[in-house]
C-alpha cells in the first residue's frame, strides 16, 4: 500500500454569541478547523484535525509514494518540517488513524491496549461570576463528571479565589478541582507578563486551603527552576507543558523535576508517535502524563486514544463549557459529537483507527480554503 495524496482543507465556524476564552484577551467570533486526509492506493483514508498545519504546503511529495505504515519514518520528516516551518502534527494523527484502518484495530489497542477508557474532567473555558461558576459545577456534577477545571484570569487573583470558593462550597468534595492559571504562554496580541514565583506561591497556598488537585501553568513555561522551587514550597501538584514545543524540553522538565503533571497535546506537539515516548519517560520518572486537548473534538479523540491505550491516565481534559463552548461548536466537523458517559468516563470504541467520522455536509458549508 502506498500514500497517494495528502489533502488539507480549511473550515470556519462563526461563533455568535462569541466565545470569551479566559486565556484570550479578544472575544472569539469564529472557530477555525483544518482537516488533514491521507489517501492511499487501496482506498483507505486516514483523517485528523487539531492544529492548523501551518507550513505543510509544498511538503506533500515527502510522503506520497511511501508506505503509510512507516510511521517512525514519517514522524522524523514531520519533526524536521516542525523545525524549519511549522507544527504539522495532525498528519501524524491521520497516519495513526490510517494504520488503524489498515490493521482493523482501534489506535488505543495498537499503541499499547492498556485501557479503552479514561476518566474525563470538565475543562471550563470562560470566566463567570462566583454564582454562575457554582451553578456550572453543579451541572457538571449532575451530568456525571467527577472532576472540573476552573480558570483564573480575572485580573486580580483574589477574584479568582472567590469564584473557586463558590464552586467548592456548591459541590463540597464531590468534584476533584483543578485550577488553570494560564501563565505559561500568551496569545500573539497579549503583552502581559506572567506571574513571579512569589505571586504563584501566594495563590498556591489558597489552592491548598481549597483542596485543589493541581495548579496548572503557574509560571512561564521556560521557568523550570521556578516551577521546581514551587513544587518544593507547596503541596498542591504543579502541572504544565501544554505548549512546550520540543520533546527534549519535556525530557528537561522531567529531569529537572519541574512538574508533577505533564500536559503535552498530541495535536500540537509530537503527535502520537512523539508523545508516546514522552508518556513512557514520564512513567519511568513517576510523573503523571495527561494531555492538554483544547483544539477541537478530533484532537480530544486522538489524545484520548493515546492516554487510554498507553498510560494509567488519571484524568483527561474534556473541553466543555456550554453554551459558549458546547459540543456542537467544539466538534462541528464530526458526524457525531464526542461525549462523556454518565459516569464521567470517556469510552473509546473498537472501530478501526481513531473511530470518528467527518460531517461532510458541515465541512462543505464551512469551507474557506
Ligand atoms: Mg491549560
Image (spheres, rainbow, N blue to C red):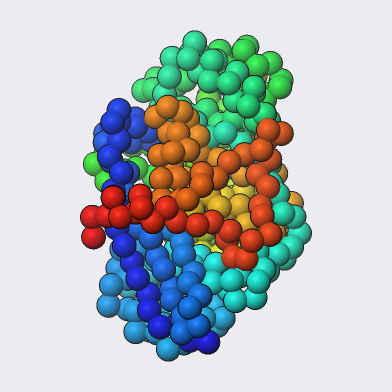
Task: Residue lying at the far right in this picture: please name it.
Answer: 114
Which residue is nearer to you in this view: 180 or 12?
12
Find the residue positioned furthest to the front: 361
Q: Is residue 213 above or below residue 32?
A: above
Is 273 placed left or right of 52 in the picture? Answer: right
**Label total for image:** 0
Q: Quadrant of residue 154?
A: top left
Query: Which quarter of the picture shows residue 90?
Result: bottom left
x and y percent of residue 178 in the render?
Answer: 59, 31
> Compared to 84, does 119 lie above or below?
above
Residue 149 falls in image quadrant: top right
The residue at the point 32 percent across, 78 percent down is 59
Relative side of 204 to 213, left or right: left
Residue 270 picture location, percent across and down: 50, 65
User: Which percent across, then down, holds residue 13?
Assistant: 30, 44
Q: Is residue 221 left or right of residue 179?
A: left
For the C terminus, the quadrant is bottom left
Q: Nearer the viewer, residue 91 or 77?
A: 91
Residue drawn 43% across and 42% down?
330
Q: In this rendering, does residue 18 appear at all?
A: yes
Q: Residue at x 43, y 73 (%)?
A: 38
Looking at the image, which is closer to me, 362 or 266?
362
Residue at screen point 48% across, 38% down: 327
> As displayed, is residue 85 above or below residue 368?
below
Amino acid at each position: 500500500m502506498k500514500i497517494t495524496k495528502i489533502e488539507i482543507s480549511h473550515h470556519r465556524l462563526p461563533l455568535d454569541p462569541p466565545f470569551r476564552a479566559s486565556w484570550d484577551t479578544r472575544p472569539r467570533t469564529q472557530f477555525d478547523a483544518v482537516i488533514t486526509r491521507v489517501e492511499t492506493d487501496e482506498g483507505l483514508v486516514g483523517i485528523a484535525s487539531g492544529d492548523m498545519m501551518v507550513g505543510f504546503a509544498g511538503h506533500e511529495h515527502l510522503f506520497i509514494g511511501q508506505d503509510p505504515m512507516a510511521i517512525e519514518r514519517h514522524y522524523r520528516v514531520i519533526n524536521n518540517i516542525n523545525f524549519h516551518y511549522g507544527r504539522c502534527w495532525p498528519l501524524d494523527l491521520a497516519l495513526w488513524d490510517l494504520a488503524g484502518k489498515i490493521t482493523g484495530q482501534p489506535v488505543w489497542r495498537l499503541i499499547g491496549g492498556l485501557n479503552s477508557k479514561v476518566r474525563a474532567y470538565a475543562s471550563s473555558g470562560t470566566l463567570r461570576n462566583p454564582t454562575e461558576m457554582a451553578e456550572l459545577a453543579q451541572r457538571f456534577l449532575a451530568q456525571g463528571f467527577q472532576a472540573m477545571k476552573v480558570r483564573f484570569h480575572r485580573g486580580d487573583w483574589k477574584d479568582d479565589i472567590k469564584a473557586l470558593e463558590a464552586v467548592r462550597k456548591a459541590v463540597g468534595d464531590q468534584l476533584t478541582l483543578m485550577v488553570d492559571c494560564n501563565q505559561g504562554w500568551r496569545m500573539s496580541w497579549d503583552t502581559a507578563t506572567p506571574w513571579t514565583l512569589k505571586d504563584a506561591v501566594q495563590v498556591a497556598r489558597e489552592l491548598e486551603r481549597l483542596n485543589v488537585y493541581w495548579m496548572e501553568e503557574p509560571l512561564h513555561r521556560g521557568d523550570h527552576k521556578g516551577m521546581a522551587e514551587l513544587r518544593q514550597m507547596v503541596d498542591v501538584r504543579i502541572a504544565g507543558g501544554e505548549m512546550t514545543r520540543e520533546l527534549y524540553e519535556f525530557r528537561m522538565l522531567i529531569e529537572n523535576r519541574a512538574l508533577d503533571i505533564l500536559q503535552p497535546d498530541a495535536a500540537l506537539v509530537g503527535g502520537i508517535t512523539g508523545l508516546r515516548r514522552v508518556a513512557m519517560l514520564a512513567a519511568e520518572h513517576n510523573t503523571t502524563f495527561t494531555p492538554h486537548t483544547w483544539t477541537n473534538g478530533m484532537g480530544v479523540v486522538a489524545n484520548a486514544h493515546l492516554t487510554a491505550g498507553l498510560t494509567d491516565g488519571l484524568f483527561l481534559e474534556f473541553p466543555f463549557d456550554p453554551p459558549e463552548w458546547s459540543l456542537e461548536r467544539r466538534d462541528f466537523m464530526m458526524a457525531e459529537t464526542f461525549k462523556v458517559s454518565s459516569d464521567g468516563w470517556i469510552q473509546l470504541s473498537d472501530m478501526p483507527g481513531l473511530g470518528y467520522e467527518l460531517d461532510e455536509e458541515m465541512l462543505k458549508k464551512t469551507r474557506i480554503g
